[in-house]
Image (cartoon, rainbow, N blue to C red):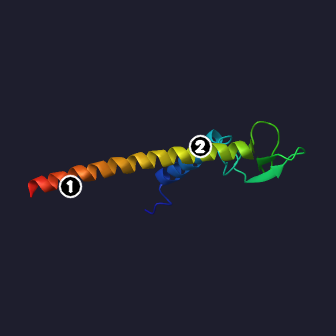
Amino acid sequence: MTDMADPYYAEMKQHKREADWLHAYVYANYCIPTKCTCGGAVTVDTDERGRNYYVCKVYEDDGLHTRHDCLAAIEEELKELKSQYDYEVSLLRKLQYEIVQKLEVVDLLK
């Protein structure tokens, strides 16, 4: 039996689609959105005051579509990148410390 004919495979694909949708829903108004909660594409739009927004292509003001301020999204994205950078730097320092310790053990064993 191939993977495509397996009912378990179809069920898992459905769960994956639901998880992808939930991810879009949870992060719809955080950082730079990649897709709307409705599953539609997100574009950049400008309002009458000249402010830029990430907006769903089929945006309606019903709470089901994404409309997020570009400046806030970029600030949130930068904050996430800084956090990730800090984590990677701390991990690098920890690994460097462990390497020094292992080299000391190797020197003692010689």
Question: Which quarter of the rendering shows the C terminus?
Answer: bottom left
Horizontal and vertical percent position of residue 24: 63, 45
Q: Earlier in the sequence, mark 2 or mark 1?
A: 2
Horizontal and vertical percent position of residue 105: 16, 51
Drawn side of residue 3 relative to residue 70, left or right: left
Drawn side of residue 48 relative to residue 8, left or right: right
Drawn side of residue 25 relative to residue 95, left or right: right
Residue 24: in sight, yes or no?
Answer: no
Question: Which quarter of the rendering shows the N terminus?
Answer: bottom left
Residue at the right extreme, as displayed:
48
Q: Residue at x 90, y 45 (%)?
A: 48
Residue type at mark 1?
Leu
**Which residue corresponds to mark 1?**
103
* Mark closer to the observer (2, 1): 1
Disc 1 element: helix
Label annotation for residue 79: 2
Disc 2 element: helix
Residue 77: in sight, yes or no?
Answer: yes
Horizontal and vertical percent position of residue 70: 74, 47
Q: Residue at x 56, y 48 (%)?
A: 81
